[in-house]
Every structure is written in structure tokens, then in C-alpha cells.
Image (spheres, rainbow, N blue to C red):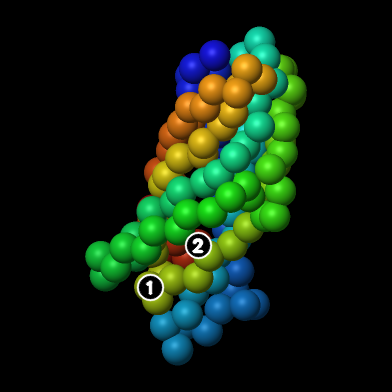
Amino acid sequence: MSAAAIHISPEPRYLAERSSPEDDHYVFAYTITITNRGDEGVTLISRRWLITDANGKRVEVEGSGVVGEQPTIAAGDEYSYTSGVSLETPVGVMEGFYTLRRDDGSEFEAPIPAFRLALPNLIN
């Protein structure tokens, strides 16, 4: 199985109630759905994010699993989780990859498509 069999769909949203723009603190939640279109199960081992804000500040985040889990995603199944990030600007971009393990123990990387974090109605 290749990374092409793994489909990753991000859905970001701004959390106004947890943000304080006057303090340059903008909080976003994002829900990621990982769909396994392959013919064997995979286990999500780790993640690596590159988060860039509108000032060009770049932060890399690496860790095992997601939200404290290392889920196994069966062939034809999907897994969703929600997490969050805070920025110092009202706009930013996240991208990265997941490291997944096949049933035979071999690993591969599945790219997470870049997605924009932005206040609603800020960018058309």
C-alpha cells in the first residue's frame, strides 16, 4: 500500500471564544479525517506538522500518534479527530505528514495537504 491509498481531509475553524485578538492570540480547531482506501489496515504511528503564521514564523511539531492515540484504521474505514493550534496572527497555514505502519510492519509517510487557518471573512 502507498500513501496514495490514504486520503486526508482537514477542516479548520476559528474559535473566537478562545481567542483574544487584542493580545495577538488566535485559536483554531481543526478536524482531520483519515480515510484508508487501501486493501490493508494501517496504524498511525506519528505526526509532523509545520505551522506558519502570517509573520513567517514557522513552528514544527512532532509527536507520537494524534490526540494521545495511535489508531489502527482498517481497509475501507476512516478515523477522525479534532485538535487545535494558536497563532499570533489571524492567518496561517498548516501542513505535514503522518507516519503510518502497514500490517507487515513496514512504514510510510502520508502527506497532510496544506490548509489555511484564517478568521472568517478575512480572506475571500
Q: Which residue is mark 1?
A: 89
Pointer 1 or 2: first along the chain: 1
Task: Say which residue appears at 62% left-offset and 37% top-offset.
Answer: 44
Which of the 4 quarters of the picture holds residue 106? top right
Residue 80 spot, x, y in % from top left:
70, 41
Q: Is 56 drawn above or below residue 65 in the view shown?
A: below
Task: Name the amino acid type tagged 1.
Answer: Thr
Query: Does 68 sit left or right of 16 as displayed?
Result: right
Task: Say which residue appears at 56% left-offset and 36% top-offset.
Answer: 9
Q: Which residue is mark 2?
A: 120
Residue 96 spot, x, y in % from top left:
42, 44
Residue 73 in sight from this viewpoint = yes
Q: Is 14 drawn above or below residue 34 in the view shown?
A: below
Q: Could you tell me how far apart the alpha carbons at marks 1 and 2 are, in whole angstroms?
A: 13 Å
Task: Name the amino acid type tagged 2.
Answer: Pro
Evaluate if marks 1 and 2 touch, with contact meaning CB atoms under 8 Å apart.
no
Task: Say which residue appears at 52% left-offset and 84% top-offset.
Answer: 20
Residue 116 in sight from this viewpoint = no
